[in-house]
Image (cartoon, grey):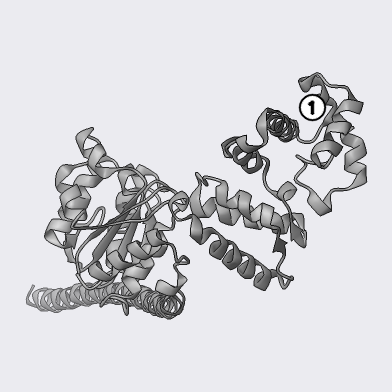
Amino acid sequence: LPLIQALADQASLVLEHARLFRQNQDRIIELENAKSTIENLNDKLESELQQKTVDLAVLRENFKRQNQEYSLRYTYQHIIGESGATQKMLQNLDRLIDVDANVTIWGESGTGKELVAQAIHFNSQRKDFPFVTENCSAIAETLMESELFGHVKGAFTGADREKLGLFQLAHRGTLFLDEVGDMSLAMQAKLLRVLQEGEVRKVGGRDYIKVDVRVLAASHKNLGQLVEAGRFRQDLFFRLNVLKITVPPLRERRDDIPLLIQHFLKVACDESQRKVPTLTRETLSALMDYSWPGNIRELQNEVQRWFAIGISKIVLENLSPHIREAVAQSRPLDFRGGMDKILSETEKRTIVAAMDRYNGNKVRVAKALKLSRTTLYAKFDQYKISPHYGKGGGEGYSKRSASRSQ
């Protein structure tokens, strides 16, 4: 019995040592697994940090390049015009540029509101910092908050990475919000808070981020009338409308039309390496008489259409049909020649309008005016109207297309 007891004591020690050894082995395995997990997390974090560092560097380089480019291109000298309305606008810009406050830019569509905003930014004390733009009418309401304030990863379906908002990107610079009148009331409330507090919170995030941004808000709608109609917050209107600049429509600055045409022609010719086409006096007179409801954008599109046609001399027939018809209807009758001249001028305008409406199809024109083909051609000769008028082809109009229309 004493011998068995002595062996039992030794056996218990061996078993206890084996248990402790196994326990230590398990802990060593757990520590190795934890170490491996930590190393993997460190590698992932380091990779993400490197990627964010690269993205930030690219972003800074893009802003630097953008600022350099805009600082050379967008100054007062690039606002084309010498008319009284244009000079008055530039004088108003001189008064507000040095005041670091929010500005409302009002003007019809196509008047060049963004160009005015660029002039404000790149002549202000914020010119060395980003100029960021957003068209409020071109982005879906569900994405507007994320676009302006950013979002964290996993904030919503598809948010697979963190995103900086436009307010953060424009920090210490300028944010241009075009067509701000189209922003919903809910979004207006969030924008107002940012302007009041000077801080943003990303979608899905908890922390507030301080931002220093000058806001330039543009609209072709009358924001004051929208406030009265209950479609725009009055408190936001007061926050944005600290300073105001009005961009005149093209019909109020007709003296600028020749300068703008020359500018657009030169830009298009430089890009395509083609010779600058010439305009007849009659053509320029018609362009000056047209009201340009689409303003400078419409004029630029018209110039680009001339290049698409590929002509070296722009005559009245090369203008868009709606321009020719509008000019013909707007010009007053000349009473100095008596009734015969008034009737002749009216008849000529009617034929020209019919050629425009039916795209130069002489069969349909003759039928609409209840004239024979022979009489219609006689009228062409009498009033010196080209049989191809209404085609918009000018020198590029082909005989094949003429025979097809007949």
**Count of all numbered marks drawn on residues in the image:** 1
Q: Is residue 334 above or below residue 258?
A: above
Task: Please tell me which residue is depicted at 83% across the width and 53% down the height of the picture.
Answer: 396
Q: Is residue 162 visible?
A: no
Of 269 and 213, which appears nearest the observer?
Answer: 269
Image spot of residue 294 (x, y percent): 51, 47
Residue 13 quadrant: bottom left
Question: Outermost residue toward the left?
Answer: 2
Q: Amino acid at mark 1?
A: Val
Above or below, 335 relative to 30: above
Toward the viewer: 209 or 349? Answer: 349
Q: Quadrant of residue 7?
A: bottom left
Location of residue 164 in the rendering, given as x and y in whole percent from the top left corner: 32, 64
Rendered position, 223 above or below 4 = above
The residue where tag 1 is placed is 365
Relative to 134, is 332 on the left or the right? Answer: right
For label 1, the crowd category at 10 Å Cα-Cα, with few meaning under 14, some 14 to 19 and many 20 or more, is many
386 vs 154: above or below: above
**Rendered image quadrant of residue 234:** top left
Q: Nearer the viewer, residue 54 or 78?
A: 78
Q: Quadrant of the C terminus?
A: top right
389 horizontally vs 5: left or right: right
Residue at image position (47%, 49%) is 251
The image position of residue 138, as x and y in percent, is 43, 48
Residue 328: image x %, image y %? Answer: 63, 38
